[in-house]
Every structure is written in C-alpha cells, then in structure tokens.
C-alpha cells in the first residue's frame, strides 16, 4: 500500500499529470465555491425562517432546545464558507475524479503496466452517477459531524473514518470498473474491504491538507489503480459466487 502511495506521489509532477491537474483544480475551485455558498444559504435559512416554522409546528415547549440548535446553526452559517472549503473537499474531489478518472488511470497504466491489458473507459454517465452519490454521502457526513466539530474533537474522528471509507470505495471502484462490470468491481472491493479502507485512509489524510488536497483526484485515482492491480493478482475465488 505504501509502495503504491509512493508511486502515485512520484507521478504527480509528470507533464501528463500536470495537464490534468490544471483542469481538475479549476473544476474543483468552482465546485467548492458553489457547495460552500449553498451550505451557507441552507444553514442561514435554518437559523432564521426555519426557526419560526419549527416552533409553530412543534409548539412553544421546544423554544429552549430550539434556541440551542439555532445557536449552533448560526455559528455554522458564519463559518460555512471557511469550514466548507475544508470539509467539503471529499465531496468535491469525488465529483472531479469522476470526470478525469480514465485520463489519469490510462496514464498510470501506460507508465507502470505497459505490458498488461489497457482498461476500458468507464461510461461517463456511470462515473458521474458514482461521483454524485459519493459526494452526496460526503456532504451528509459533514452535516452529521458538524455539531461534534464545534464542541469536541470527536467530529474530526467521525469525519476522517467516514471519509476514508467513502473515498476508498469510490476511487477503488472507479479504477476497478475499467476492467470489471460494476457488480464485479464492488465485489472485489468487498473481498478486500480492510485493504481498500486502509488505502482510503491515505486519501482521507491527503484530502485533509489545504491547497494540496486540490490534487486529490490525481493521487486517489493513481493510488487505487495500483491497488486494483495488486489486489486483482491476489484474488483467487470468484468475485461473484455462483448459486
């Protein structure tokens, strides 16, 4: 796993990767601004109009607890853009990766596996669907962990573990689907769940580094291409057991 990570990092400065990096960074910056501002508006609405609606629907007895929730949401709205630019990066990178997975994976395969069969491009609609699903789950994780982030370090742990699982799953399956149907790619990931999670943890650490995390689509995809190659060789039983 560490060898695969080092290979992925060493290729980051190659001319082919630099060209993809410029495109992925531009798209990531646009997406992070849109998501962060959208989150800010949502939290601001919950802290204002949503409060009156909740009290009218639930009765005056919820006034005290509601004030606490509103206090949290007000702080969250104020920090929405700042925190969003950091903690929404997993969602952003999965969306970006879905657009560039084949370009990045093909370059890794050409460089490190020239004598092996070349993967087939993942259909654009399928890649986009996987990216949107994982991005949505990442935003949900952020919203769940947000109160814990404000009050205790537990939120960081929750966020990191969930991010490792989500990113590990997303990047590995996108790399595997170049060689397997979606069902087989998912089965291969489940067979090697702990290893894929460990590689996902490396991606989660990478995405937690400000500025550097803009290159996460390149690092995550390259890492999981290497992991897929390694795990495919170690897989001896059928990916989908026969009845």
Image (spheres, helix red, strand yellow):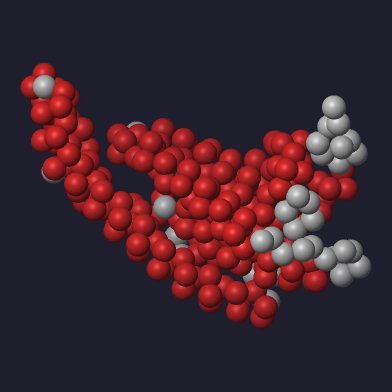
Up-down relation of residue 104 to residue 84 (above or below): below
> Picture coordinates of residue 201 (x, y %)?
60, 45
Find the residue positioned furthest to the top.
Answer: 61
The residue lying at 63 percent from left, 45 percent from top is: 169
* Image quadrant in which you'd find residue 235: top right
Q: Judge whether residue 181 can be spotted in this image.
A: yes
Image quadrant holding the C terminus, namely: top right
Count of marks overlaid on the render: 0
Which of the two residues, 132 or 141, is positioned nearer the viewer here? 132
The residue lying at 41 percent from left, 33 percent from top is: 154
Q: Is residue 43 left or right of residue 105?
A: left
Up-down relation of residue 8 to residue 22 (above or below): above
> Picture coordinates of residue 12 (x, y %)?
64, 70
Q: Is residue 133 left or right of residue 180?
A: left
Up-down relation of residue 183 to residue 18 (above or below): above
The residue lying at 36 percent from left, 41 percent from top is: 143
> Picture coordinates of residue 99 (x, y %)?
58, 65
Q: Judge whether residue 217 can be spotted in this image.
A: no
Which of the two residues, 68 or 205, is positioned nearer the viewer here? 68
Which of the two residues, 183 or 223, is positioned nearer the viewer here? 183
* Image quadrant in which you'd find residue 56: top left
> Picture coordinates of residue 136 (x, y %)?
46, 47
The residue lying at 44 percent from left, 40 percent from top is: 141
Q: Is residue 131 left or right of residue 159?
A: right
Find the residue positioned furthest to the left.
Answer: 60
């Amino acid at each position: 796993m560490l060898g695969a990570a080092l290979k992925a990092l060493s290729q980051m400065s190659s001319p082919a990767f630099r060209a993809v990096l410029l495109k992925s960074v531009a798209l990531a910056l646009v997406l992070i601004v849109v998501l962060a501002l959208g989150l800010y508006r949502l939290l601001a609405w919950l802290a204002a109009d949503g409060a009156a609606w909740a009290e009218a629907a639930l009765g005056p007895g919820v006034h005290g607890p509601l004030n606490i929730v509103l206090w949290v949401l007000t702080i969250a709205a104020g920090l929405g853009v700042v925190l969003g630019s950091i903690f929404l990066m997993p969602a952003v990178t999965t969306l970006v990766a879905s657009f560039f997975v084949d370009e990045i994976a093909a370059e890794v395969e050409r460089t490190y596996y020239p004598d092996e069969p070349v993967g087939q491009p993942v259909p654009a609609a399928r890649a986009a669907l996987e990216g949107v699903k994982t991005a949505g789950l990442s935003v949900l994780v952020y919203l769940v962990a947000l109160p814990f982030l404000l009050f205790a370090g537990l939120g960081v742990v929750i966020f990191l573990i969930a991010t490792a699982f989500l990113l590990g799953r997303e990047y590995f399956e996108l790399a595997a689907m170049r060689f397997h149907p979606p069902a087989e790619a998912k089965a291969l990931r489940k067979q090697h769940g702990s290893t894929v999670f460990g590689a996902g943890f490396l991606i989660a650490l990478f995405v937690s580094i400000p500025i550097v995390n803009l290159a996460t689509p390149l690092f995550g995809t390259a890492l999981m291409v290497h992991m897929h190659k390694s795990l495919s060789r170690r897989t001896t039983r059928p990916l989908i057991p026969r009845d």
